[in-house]
Amino acid sequence: MAIRTLDVPFRDTLPEERGWGGAFWLFVKKNPLGAAGGVLMLALILAAVFADALATHNPIRTSTRVLMAPGAEFWLGTDNLGRDLWSRVVYGSRISLLVGVASTLLGAVTGGLVGLVSGYVGGKTDLIAQRLMDIMQALPILVLALVMAAALGPSLTNTIIAISVVIAPRAARVVRASVLAIREFIYIEAAHALGGGHGRVAFRHILPNTFGPFVVLVTAQLGGAILAEAALSFLGLGVPEPYPSWGRMLSIAAAEYATKAPWLVIYPGIAISLAVFGTNLLGDALRDTLDPRLRGS
């Protein structure tokens, strides 16, 4: 009795290789909320990059047309100094994105290096480093940022430094946890056996394998950095005038003009909410995609 076989070429039975386009659409299909967060982040980036073209007026130029309601000339109205709110919101995206990205990268890279050295060396180095991270994490995020901003003074650079100090302990913990697991793998022992020095093993064989958790951390912390910048600016310890910061706009409008000119509070508040919401959605989606323990759950 002859055995019948399916007349299908072997190469057709293999799963189809996906390029960047296929991977992108698979991500959108499996994580629609993450894709929505990506769209919001893309809109924030485009607004920051093309602020000069999108703005209809000079964001820092004052005029006599104060507290005008939204209309054809001033799309989102004007503030108490006659400045166009639409232009200030658009330029505010540039400040928020700059502070958010710079502080997140600075804090994540600094904390990541601390976590790499701490986890790889171990012993007293790990003990001292982690106790310092515990002390920094014992304080609430906003309180620590307020202390740093008050000590350094209100400026764009000092705001970035203050927020990065808050992010560094969390980055150190994430990278250290990955390093503790990776350094026990057999290929790390093989690298040592072949004569690889500690620096080469740590930075060439261990550090690249922490890239996935690092990307998730950066994306997740970006929204918190934007929110921290808005909070510091609202309290007068963040980005000073004449920079059009979203938090600064709320600080000026909230106390005196919220009832008679509600657009001064609504539109900067919406901008902050959408930026933070978008980064959180994208961060959660990247975590689910890059973390093999959550993949498919």
Image: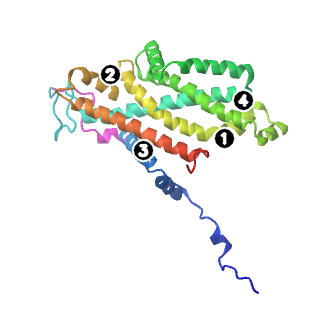
Which callout, 1 or 3, points at the residue further toward the start of the chain?
3
Q: Distance between the residues labelled 2 and 1?
A: 42 Å
Which callout, 4 or 1, points at the residue further toward the start of the chain?
4
The residue pinned by badge 1 equals 209
The residue pinned by badge 4 equals 120
Secondary structure of the residue carrying numbered label 3: helix
Side (left or right) of 83 relative to 109: left
The residue pinned by badge 2 equals 241
Location of residue 235 in the rendering, given as x and y in whole percent from the top left corner: 35, 19
Q: What stretch is highlighted in magenta?
A: 49-63
Q: What residue do we see at 21% from left, 39% from top? A: 75
Which callout, 3 or 4, points at the residue further toward the start of the chain?
3
Rendering quarter of residue 278:
top left
Location of residue 283 in the rendering, given as x and y in whole percent from the top left corner: 49, 40
The residue pinned by badge 3 equals 37
Mark closer to the observer (1, 3): 3
Which callout, 3 or 2, points at the residue further toward the start of the chain?
3
Side (left or right) of 286 relative to 56: right
Badge 2 amino acid: Glu
